Amino acid sequence: MFDSAPTHTAFHPAGPGAPARACGSTTGAATAVGGVAAVTTKEAQGSVGHLAGLADLAPDPDLVRSLDAVSPEGLTDDAVLELVAAWGRVASWARARQLDAVAELAGRPSMNPVWPAAANVSARQRELGIAGDEIALRLRTSRHRGEAMVRMAQAFDRHLAETGDALRHGLIDEAKARAVVDGLARVAIPVALEVQDRVLPIAPERTPGQLSADVQRALIECDPVDAAHRHAAAAEERRVCRPRVLPDGMAGIYAVLPATDAVAVDTALNDAARTARVSGDGRTIDQLRADTFVALLAGGAHGSAIGAAGGGAGFKRATVGRGPSIRVTVPISVLLGDESVAATLEGYGAIAAEEARRIAADPQSTWRRLLTDPASGRVLEFGRRSYRPPAELADLVRARDGTCVMPTCGARAQYCDLDHTVPFEQGGETAPRNLGTLCRHHHLLKTHAGWRLEQPEPGEFTWTTPTGRVWPPAAGPPGADPPWS
Ligand SMILES: [Zn+2]
């Protein structure tokens, strides 16, 4: 199968095409340990500057121990390079072992709730179950990342086992494994297997980007008829992601679009920027593209290149009139000149005091400043008279929570449901100490999938997941009782 892989027996204990050996099997390990150990000893004597045979060693616990004993100082450049590669194979192997555990978890009944029809849960969500949410919370990663792990684990546990084996043997890294799994996500199993057979043998020699292109090409060649259907299904999931925090008060926006739309947007921004440059605008192409992007969608402050481009880009303003409403929570001391406290831009996080004051002073801005000085003394306690929180109370809770109250979730409070922590029907009051912001997905988990939410203090939330984990943990690190103790 893996023609281009190193041919040392440690890689193929049972020959090419054989089932994956059990992890931790010691076949070939003696060679591995002996090889590295011998070299390490020589290294200690200062006589050899390379690690003979290291490139041929398959990842397993013995290789980890051996590599851990090797110090890169004093090795030749080439040997250090092989050390980098060997640790990379170990990382691949470790990821494959982790995904074994993910597959086990994802298959358990507790991770596959029976959703009521009224919950309106997507087929994709039903197939994935809720293991991705459980993992995201435990690893403190995004729900997207947790679900990606589950998808990959499920694929390796089923039809894409050979790709999983390539990862396990360190022949490909995680990025390449993901290129295969993502590329074949919507493909009928026979076609997926055929594509896998085509691309996997050359995968070790390809970059992740090249491998993605290989998969796309093979897919079209294997099943041209279905390509249009797959694209239509993929286009259903077009989206613009929420801003991602970058250093120095910057943020990235990432969009997933049909390729033709993406190229059209890119071309339009380029045309506008280049026309502006020709007309003498001193900004760089990148600056003009960025300013045009903002001006078209949000009426940005920097001015676009569209005027200079004569509107030839074919853009229409997505938002007419006033800019979108932006919420900034500002400690009152910031407005009085304090530089040492950060303000909070909802949907992003901390911003510098000066930036907050600039927004405050901008007459065009539609920001809503929510002063956090408790000195106002206003107590918002509305009791149980109504289910729907009054606007002031809703504002207060949204400003307090900032995002969905699932710790791994960044959904902006502004777009979240206001959830009664103890349901209204069960006597829960409509007051800050019983209200919290939940995005639709996490609201669904709470209502239908056995995730329990409590609010011991106003604005402090405790989740109990279907595995029984409590977040945040009551005391000590989670997982205090590992199976080997
Ligand atoms: Zn959420």
Image (spheres, rainbow, N blue to C red):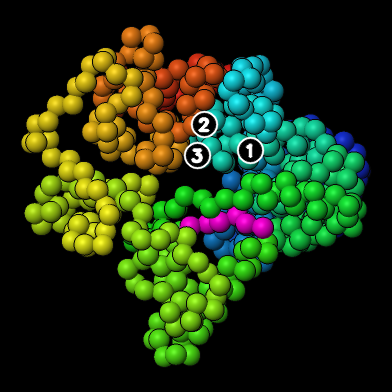
* Quarter of the view holding residue 307: bottom left
> Residue 420 has which mark?
none
Q: Is residue 256 in the magenta section?
A: yes
Instruction: Give the residue pinned by disc 1.
Output: 149
Mark 1: few/some/many CA within 10 Å (<14, 14-19, 20+) = many
* Quarter of the view holding residue 99: top right
Q: Which of marks 1 and 2 is nearer the N terminus?
A: 1
C-alpha gap between disc 1 and disc 2: 18 Å
**Which stretch is magenta?**
253-258
Mark 2: few/some/many CA within 10 Å (<14, 14-19, 20+) = some
| Residue 47 seen from this side | no
Instruction: Give the residue pinned by disc 3.
Output: 141
Q: Which quadrant would the C terminus be assigned to in this image?
A: top right
C-alpha gap between disc 1 and disc 3: 11 Å
In the rendering, at what x and y percent does residue 91 appear?
64, 46
**Residue drawn where x is 43% and y is 59% of the image:** 319
Q: Does the residue labelled 2 lie within 8 Å of ligand 1?
A: yes
> Residue 441 has which mark?
2
Instruction: Report the amino acid beneath label 1.
Output: Met
Identify which residue, 454 or 274, lies in the foreground: 274
Residues marked 1 and 2 touching at CB (< 8 Å): no
**Residue drawn where x is 51% and y is 83% of the image:** 274
Instruction: Report the amino acid beneath label 3.
Output: Thr
Q: Which of marks 1 and 3 is nearer the N terminus?
A: 3
C-alpha gap between disc 2 and disc 3: 16 Å
Q: Is mark 3 within 8 Å of ligand 1?
A: no
In the rendering, at what x and y percent does residue 48 appear?
67, 63
Name the chief secondary structure element in magenta: loop
At mark 2, the secondary structure is helix
Identify which residue, 221 or 272, lies in the foreground: 272
